[in-house]
Image: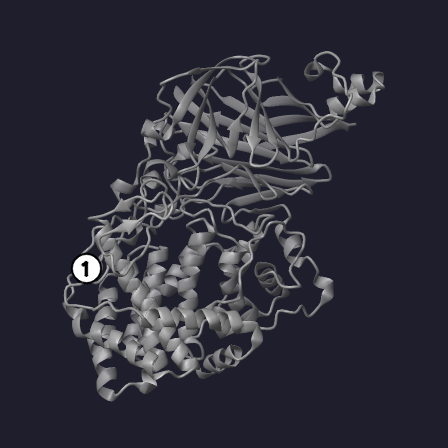
Amino acid sequence: MNDKRLVKMRTNACLPQFEAAMRLLRQEAEEGSRISYTIGPAEYGEWMHQYYCHHDGAKLSFEWGQPHAHVCPVCGTVWSGEPFDSAWTSFVHANIGRAVFHMAMLHAIEPDEALLYQTKQFLLSYADYYEGYKIHGSIPYNGPGKLFAQTLDEAHWIIDLSVGFQFIRASLSDEEEAHIRYGLLEPCVHFLIAHKEEQIHNHAVLITSAIASLGILLNDEGIIHAGLSGEYGLYDQIKRGRFADGLWYEGNVQYHFYAFKSLLNYALMAEGTPWDIWQESGLQSMFDYPVHWILPNGYMPSFNDAGSAGGIHTYAPYYEIALDIFGEEIYRSLLNTAYGTPWAETAFTGVKTVERDSILALLFGCELAPADASEDEQLWKATHRSVSMPVSGITKLVNAKRWQAFMKHSKFGGEHDHMDRLGLSVVCGEVPLIVDPGTTAYGVPAHYGWFKHTFSHNTVCLNGADQPPADGRVVRFEEHPWGTWTETMVDWKAEAYEMKDRIILPPELSPWDLLAYEGASIRRINVLTELYLLDMVKVDVSEPREISWMNHFSGRLEEEEDKVWQSTDVCLSRLDQQWFKHKSRFVAGGISERTLTFRYKMEKGSLRQHFWSSQPVEIYSALTPDNPPDRDRTSLIMQVKTSQTIVFAQVLFYDSEQEPLPEGAKLVGNVESVDYADTIESIETVEVIEKIAKTEALQITEMSDQSYRMTITADGIRDEYSLMWDDGGAWLDKWDGRR
C-alpha cells in the first residue's frame, strides 16, 4: 500500500459521501477495542464451517463470554461441545485479526493512542506464542493450520494482521517491530510456504497472495518469489485458473470473487512496487464477467458451492476498485444502483441496496455522479441481454418480460462443483421459477447430503448416481426476432476434462459413478420467446440405464381433480431418502402418460408445466430442501429404465398476476382441447376469446428418432417448430406463428 493510496484514504475520510464508511470503521474499531480475550500459549481452533445450526443452516451467535453455549438465532437451539467450542475459538481469532485491521486503519486516519496500544498488544501477544502452536487440522482437501484448522484460515488471519502492522509500523519501537517480525510474521509466512497447495484452487490463490504480500511487507525477495513464481504460485494460479473470458474456473460468482479478492489484496500491497499488477492482461475481465450474470433484482444466480444471497449489494466494494483503476462508466452505474443513489438505474426492481460503507470505498472511492447522461440504463442493457460464454460455459437467454434462463454447460469445477452439467435455472424478475439452489454452510448436513449432488439440480441423472467430471459445451446459440435458442451438450465417452491435471480429487470427495455414465450423452435445447420457455432434453445411453430427469420448482404443486397421486416409498436416487418428503407417484390424469400438464403456485403468480416424453415414464413428486434448508421446493422427477434414446420436453408458462376472468365470462365446452386458430376465427364472444387466450398447450409429433414437430400455443398465439437432431447439432426452424 503506497503513499498515494494512503493519501486517497485520508482524503476520502473527510468527504461527506464517505461518512457511512467512516462511521462503520469507527464502530468496528470500537468493538475491537472492547475485546478482552487473553491470547495464550495453547490456542487451538477448528473449522469455522462447523459453527452453524444443523437444523436450518444459520450461523450460530458469537458471544465472547459464552465459549460453551452456541445459540441458533433462527430456531433457538443451543449447541455445545465439539466441534462447536473449537470452531468458536477460530471465530475468536478471526475477529481479533479483523479488529487489528480496523483499529490500525482508523489510527492511521485519526490517530488514537488507545487504539494504537490495543493493536500493539494483540500483535505482540501473538508474537509471544505463535511459533509454539501445534500444527493440526483434518479437513478434507485442505492443508493444516497452527492457530486454525486449515492453511486457508491462517492466511486470512495473517493478512489482516499484516495490514494492521503496516498501518502502525511507524509507531513501533525497533524492539517491538523485530519481535512482531521474527515471532509472528516470518514464522507464519514460512508455515504458509511449507503448506502451499499443489493444485489450482481459490485456497491456493489466497495462500500465495498472502505469502507474496508478506514478502513485500518484509522486503524479502525470496518470500515474494515463493508466493508469485513457479508451479502453483500466484502467477500460475491466475494463468491456469482464470478462463479466457474472465471467470474463475470454480464456476460461480461467489468463488470467483473469493479468489479475486485475494488477488486484489495482493495488488493493493504491491501497488507502486516492481510487482504492481493493476494493468496485467485479464485483470479487468474478472470485474467484467460477473456483470453478465446480474438478475433483474440485482442478485446473482447460485451455481456450485455458492450461497443464495449474493448480488450487486454484496460485490459493490470490489467495483470501487474497478472504477478507480479502469474508469469504465458501467462500474459507476453498478455502484449507483447498489447504493440506491439518485443516479441508480430504475429498470432493476427489488434491488437490495446498501450503504457506501466499505473499507474499499475509503481506499478507492470516486465521484459517483455520471459523467455522461447518455449512458442511462447502461448496466441494465449489459445485463438483460442474451449471451453465450462458451469458454466458461454459461449461456443466458432473456426476454422483454424479465425472464432470465441460464444453461450450465461449464467445465468441471473441482472440489466446489455440483456435478450438474446441463443444469437449468430460470427466474422472472425477482421470482425464482426453477433454479439452482447453490448450497449452505459446509458444516450443515444438507450440504454434503443434498446440495452437492446431481439429483438436487434441474438436469439428468443416470442410475441415481452423480455425474462424473466432464466438460459441457454449447453447440448452437441463435437470436431471432421471435426469440433466442441454444443447444448444449455433454458426454462421458472419455474421462478427459480441462482441469484434470490441475486439481486434486481425493476419493472421499469423488462420489460419482463412472460406469453409470460410461458412453452416455445428454443434449439440451432451450428456446425463450416472449411468452414461454421451451426445454427439450435428449439422453443417449449405450446400455440399459435408469434415467431420471429432475425439475425442482420454487413453489408448490397445485391439486387438480383430474390428477391422481399415490403415496410411495420408492427410492428415488442413491441419496439418503431423508431429503425427500411426501413422496408421491403420479397415477392418472391428463391426456396420456406421455403428455401432461401441471400447475404450481409460486411466490407470486402461477407456473404451468406442459410435459411430453418420447417414451412412457414414471412421474414422482416430493418436497426437497430449498436454500436455506428449512424451506422446501417441489421436485418433479420423470424416470424410465431404457436402453434407447429418450427425449423429454416441457414448456413453461408463467402468469405473474393470475388475473381473474372478466365478470360474466362464460366457458363453452372443454377449452383446453379447442383448436385455437379455428375457434378464434369462428367465435365472436369476447369472454370466450379471453379465456382461450389464457390457456396453453404443447403438442409434439415424433417424425423419426431424430426429427420432431412441435406446436405450442399460448395467449392466443400458435408457434410451430420443426426440429432435426443430428451429430453436428440441432436444427430448429420456427415456421409458423399467428394470432
Q: Is residue 446 above or below residue 101?
A: above
Where is residue 437, by image quadrant? top left
Label 1 sits on what residue type? Tyr
Q: How is the image coloured?
A: one colour
Q: Quadrant of residue 592?
A: top right
Q: Quadrant of the C terminus?
A: top right
Q: Is residue 151 above or below residue 494?
A: below
Q: Residue at x 22, y 60 (%)?
A: 145
Q: Which residue is mark 1?
A: 44
Count the marks.
1
Name the side, left or right, on which 364 lies relative to 652.
left
The picture places residue 663, in percent across and down from the top left corner, at: 77, 24
For the question of whether residue 81 can be seen, the reply is yes
Q: Nearer the viewer, residue 394 or 105?
A: 105
Left or right placement of residue 184 versus residue 42 in this view: right
Q: Position of residue 547 (x, y in %)?
A: 43, 23
Q: Quadrant of the N terminus?
A: bottom left
Q: Secondary structure at mark 1?
A: loop
Q: Residue at x 33, y 86 (%)?
A: 170
Q: Label 1: how many residues lie within 10 Å, few (<14), some (14-19) or many (20+)? A: many
